[in-house]
Amino acid sequence: MSAALRAALRFPARGLLLVLGACANPGTNAPGTPATPAPIALPVTAKFDPQPIAAPEHLPEPLVTRCDFTRNLPGDELFPGPQRIELSGDGTIRLAREVMIPLAGCANLELITVTGHTDRLGPAQTRQTLSERRAEAVKAFLVAHGIPSARINALGAGSGKPVATGCETASRHRELVDCLRPDRRVTIEVKGTAR
């Protein structure tokens, strides 16, 4: 048994180094003497000759993040009554929460389209006028909160785009009014780019 192996058995941590050292230079190590590895010569196969890198002809456009969103807000919550055109207190809170807060993330506001909708009850001209005036009331709220008027388009759709279903079975007027509730709404569509 070699002296390096005997030392490894007595002092395992130091012996490991001795055994490894003995393997690197067999026969030349004395216990406690560090091993000296022989230098290795590697052949050079290629020269490094850096070439200048040409700039690309066309850089890609930076990615633009959109802040587009649409909100359908119930008319019965925005306005205090069936034929009313002024916003209710709850309506202003809902507009602030669901429209103004998300608008804060838009760096470049392109267009806001506000569309008023009504149900099918009552004369067509009355429904059209009500939808237009409600869209204008929401526009006025947005302008009062710093949105440029030129960026807002207010439209009235009357009862032309219904969304309520299953109302044909309503037998009483109150049931029909309740069933048509989803048709009484204001849609706000925002187009722009984010910060």
Image (cartoon, rainbow, N blue to C red):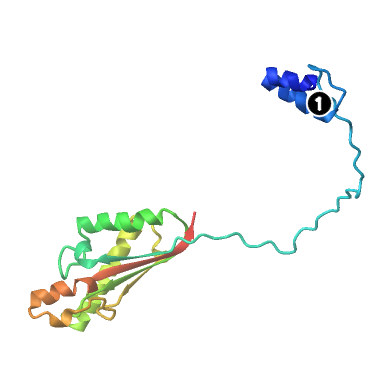
Q: Is residue 99 left or right of residue 92?
A: right
Q: Is the residue 3 above or below the residue 114 in the image?
A: above
Element type at mark 1: helix
Q: Which residue is found at the position 87% from the left and 24% from the top?
A: 27
Quarter holding residue 162: bottom left
Q: Residue at x 14, y 72 (%)?
A: 178
Q: Nearer the viewer, residue 7 or 173?
A: 7
Q: Position of residue 70 (x, y in %)?
A: 37, 66
Residue found farthest to the front: 1
In depth, the one of 8 and 135 nearer the eye is 8
Which image quarter: residue 117? bottom left
Q: Position of residue 169 (x, y in %)?
A: 13, 81
Q: Is any atom of residue 146 visible in this view? A: no
Identify the amino acid type marked 1: Ala
Q: Is residue 96 visible to the viewer in this orientation of the structure?
A: yes
Task: Please name the residue shown 90% across and 41% down the image.
Answer: 42
Decide: is 187 above or below 11.
below
Mark 1 neighbour density, 10 Å: few (under 14) some (14–19) many (20 or more): many
Q: Which residue corresponds to mark 1?
A: 22
Q: Would you place residue 191 above or below residue 157 in this image?
A: above
Left or right of 87: which side holds 172? left
* Quarter of the N terminus within the rendering: top right
Front residue of this view, candidates 33 and 145: 33
Answer left or right for 87 relative to 174: right
Image side of residue 163 versus residue 122, left or right: right
Can you give x and y, in whole percent of width and height, for residue 63 in the image?
A: 57, 60
